[in-house]
Image (tube, grey):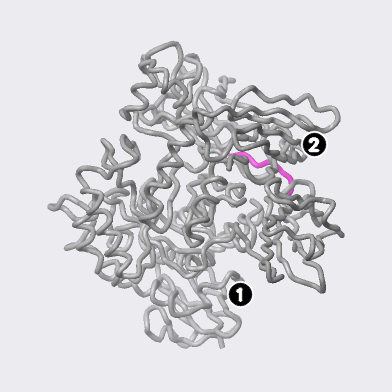
Amino acid sequence: MHHPGPPRFVQVGESVELAPRSPDPAATFTWNILDRPDGSQVTIEDSPVVHLTPDTPGTYRAELNAPDGTHVQTVRAFPDPRREARFSVSTEDVDGDVDHVESATVIGKFNDFTMGIHQAERNGDEWNIDVELPPGDHEAIFTFGEEFDPFATTTTVVEGPGRPRLHLDGREEDDKVVVTATTESAPDSDNPAVEFYFDDRDALGNDDVTIDGKELRVPTGSLPESARVHAVPVAERHGIADTLLIQSEETGAVSFDRPADAPEWLRNATLYEIFVREFAGETVDTTFEEIERRVPYLESLGVDAVWLTPVLESPTRHGYHITDFFDTATDLGSRREFESLVERLHAAGIKVLFDLVINHTSRDHPNFQLHRAGVTEYADHYERIPAEQDMTGVDWAGDDAPGHYFSWKMIPNVNYDSLAVRAWMLDVLDEWAPLVDGFRCDVAWGVSHGFWKEARERLKSEDSDFLLLDETVPRDADFRENEFDFHYDTDLYYTLREIGNNEAPATAIFDALAASQRHGYPDDAIHMRYVENHDEDRYATECEEGTLRPAAAATFTLPGVPMIYYGQERGVPEDRGTMRWHDGDAKLTTFHRRLVELRNELSALRSPTVDPIAYETSETDGERVVAYERTDGDTRLAVVLNFGADPTTVTLDPAVDSEDLLSGTDIGNGNGIQVHDAAILKLR
């Protein structure tokens, strides 16, 4: 079916991509505008994939004429919350010689980290640029050279409310189905109203229902076999939509499903990332077979899922420059050997996440070579930008250049406005999804929301337990809206780095957790808590000595799903260094094993809520300590983290048992408890 999918919710000035699903590149697809708000001048181009940019708040309806019929796409546009804000850096902020530099390229989330779009001109010893930004904290990178040498990073804050949230539930009541929206206000914001919308793919509409505030009712006899109800919270800003699927059986039974929710297995899982080509050790080349031989180690850690960095053909050791999406890398082994590794991991009860890289290809991919060489069939396969916007210094063939992010000139962006590209990447999903348990999606923020919504429905229709993890840096709650199950938590990541360098108090952890609400993530969203990954310096290398243990303990004792990056538990000092097998830190490994074990044993550590605990310390570095309660309603636990260089005596209110469940020792000293780095204790 070519229907473009569920209603879309955007703000005025925000472009929304509309595209047919399951596209045949040889077929004809045309769009036209059916309805638009009074005063709107919006048009859409004559193309199979179109970009609608609302210019007035209200509801837009676009019609797709496709080989299988005519379909309607609804787009609701809310007022634009953006306001002018300034990014600024001075010569003192730049680590390098910029005495004679007049302009800097500025990139950030506001321009998708794309070079050449925004330039800041020098004014005395400063470079300033004004851009339109929504309320919140924003970061920008000023680069004074193509390869970010030198560069400076700066932040700005736009005052204003966060995004409201809601959760849909359904029930039967007499001869009706009732859908209830439970709303949560954004911090310092008004109580949100609720708008309900129906999926244009289903035979359910406004004439079939009654709406009273935050409840929708529909007579059971009016229900089609399947109907999707969407709702969006609206206050000063709109939040992300939630969806409820209502299914009516011939027997009269009615069932409810929440298609945006994550697989249940994820909530109790521990994830382990393997940078594949460094996992086997110093003298052995890593292959699928060699990783398979080391599965007993993963079993001993107790992890539930393994994320493998890319395993497809690539000229690089990291694997993110892919030259063949349909075959495994020659140096790692054959497809059959990869399947054997997956089977062995499954036999150990460990799920496998495949690193899906579909925002770009290697510059050496044949499709890109044919594209730049003017082969007609590949003309639309990659993004093209004006030559004057290009910052790479490459003498590209032709009078334009390929689109790319940052300074990633070796990995050009594919063009999702091309039906051929969409079909190509859907084939990639179909190729690997049957073998694995989920995808970690590289540069997820670079691929269109419409494509991810299609991918989710396509993958989940075959296996509802299939997992989708987004790489959105910085995090973006819009990718939770019927797209991803599991989200990078960059707020906690950066906060733990600041705490580890004594640049923030340990209690800043609570601010990082609260950021999820400000962004608009619903309470049941699941976040990946981590201290390092393959793109970042090692925590122990970048932060003060002794702070890795409390930071790692935070990821295991706060709500969310912890991720261990290979070697984190062995003391590997380089971000992509060789795994330390014979000379690793045995005590640190034991510490991580115990964190996994306790999280598995104690459901309180997996509960969705966390509450600060009042404490006192006898030392002067009390700001380097944080304490919080974790409970499942039966068991109450106190977690105490000490990021200070020395052990500290802590007294808690309420009182706790003195036995530390983490170390298995009594840490009472007569004046309280003595915490070296982390402790988990039962509250009395």
Q: Are the residues tagged 1 and 2 within 8 Å (C-beta)?
A: no
Range of residues picked out in magenta: 155-161
Say what amino acid the circle numbered 2 marks. Pro
**Residue 405 located within the stretch drawn in magenta:** no
* Residue nearest the viewer, comparing 171 with 649: 171
* Residue nearest the viewer, comparing 674 with 333: 333
Query: Residue 57, labelled with which disc?
Result: 2
Residue 263: percent from left, percent from top = 51, 64
Q: How many marks?
A: 2
Say what amino acid the circle numbered 1 marks. Ala
Q: How far is disc 1 from disc 2 in space, using C-alphas?
A: 47 Å
Q: Is residue 93 left or right of residue 291?
A: right
Crowdedness near tag 2: few (<14), some (14–19) or many (≥20) residues, C-alpha within 10 Å: many
Q: Is residue 419 left or right of residue 161?
A: left
Residue found at x 48% / y 25%: 383
Residue found at x 61% / y 74%: 614
Query: Residue 253, labelled with which disc?
Result: none
* Residue nearest the viewer, comparing 477 with 595: 477
Residue 360: percent from left, percent from top = 42, 34
State the residue position of label 1.
Answer: 614
Q: Using the rendered image of the protein, determine whether residue 503 is visible from the camera's viewpoint.
A: no
**Residue 160 located within the stretch drawn in magenta:** yes
The image quadrant where one finds the C terminus is bottom right
Element assignment for label 1: strand
Residue found at x 52% / y 54%: 487
Task: Tell me: residue 593, above or below residue 67.
Answer: below
Q: Using the rendered image of the protein, determine whether residue 334 is visible from the camera's viewpoint.
A: yes
Q: Nearer the viewer, mark 1 or mark 2?
A: 2
Residue 373: percent from left, percent from top = 35, 16
Residue 123: percent from left, percent from top = 59, 20
Task: Tell me: residue 266, above or below residue 12.
Answer: below
